[in-house]
Image (cartoon, rainbow, N blue to C red):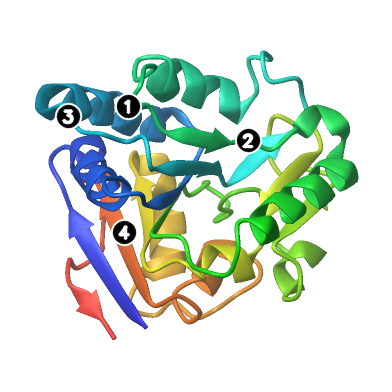
Amino acid sequence: MTLEIELADDPPRACAAMLIGAAVGGGHVVLAGGGTPRAAYEELVQAVQAVGADLSETCFWVGDERCVPPDDERSNYKMIKESLLDPLAGPRSPTVRRIKGELGPEAAAAEYERELRAAGPGRFDLVLLGLGPDGHTASLFPGQESLSERSRLVVGVPEAGLEPFVPRVTLTLSALTSARRVVFLVSGESKADAVAAAFGPGAVPDPHVPSSLLPPLAEEVTVLLDASAARGLAVGERS
């Protein structure tokens, strides 16, 4: 396990460089919802268009979804479509596998699990994650049973631990940590305490801080932070 903390002047731009590196050449990349990832996707679009990169062999997966229709404002897929997929539409555009949250948490989880397993054995090249002020990531919330799931790749989450309070579907820890690289993209002072609890020098795996559970399970974890989110942390690497 390697955990690397990186302080960046522009975390979304730094994240976009990591995304394009993983995506070009047929990579399988898991995308996150949220405002900071959206900024990274917009940077990624600019980079792809600037160099004319071919993403036609790339497959994007969605790490978690709210149980709403895909055109609902709360849908992670809607945000990803608007900020990334629509601008890249064309013969060189990537494939995307969305979670059909409108089916409900259990049915959507079962269908997405089938899709993942049908894709065959292998690993994600990169998993992009956010971090909530309560330490949650994807839709893995503090103290919930989903954190102990090890046999399934996808689970339904009947009760969200944070707004919007709608049921969710999420990749499990087993699925997320199968990646060659996990990247957390975090900005803002409101996340600083969660960053310290999950990745600080004294951090230990704690189901009350779900993000803290990933570093011991993953091969490589990178945490991209702005100065506000990194408040009180030393930048470096922990192995």
Name the residue carrying label 3: 47
For label 1, the crowd category at 10 Å Cα-Cα, with few meaning under 14, some 14 to 19 and many 20 or more, is some
Whole-percent x and y of residue 41? 34, 30
The Cα atoms of the two marked residues, 3 and 2, are separated by 23 Å
Name the residue carrying label 4: 223
Q: Are discs 3 and 4 less than 8 Å apart at CB? A: no
The Cα atoms of the two marked residues, 4 and 1, are separated by 30 Å
Q: Amino acid at mark 1?
A: Arg
Whole-percent x and y of residue 146? 76, 63
Dot in front, 4 or 1: 1
The residue drawn where x is 15% and y is 47% is: 8
- Residue 190 in the image: above or below residue 116: above
Q: Earlier in the sequence, mark 3 or mark 4?
A: 3
Q: Are discs 4 and 2 less than 8 Å apart at CB? A: no
Q: Are discs 3 and 1 less than 8 Å apart at CB? A: no
Q: Nearer the viewer, residue 144 or 85?
A: 85
- Residue 3 in the image: above or below residue 119: below
Query: Horizontally, is 179 left or right of 65 in the view?
Result: left
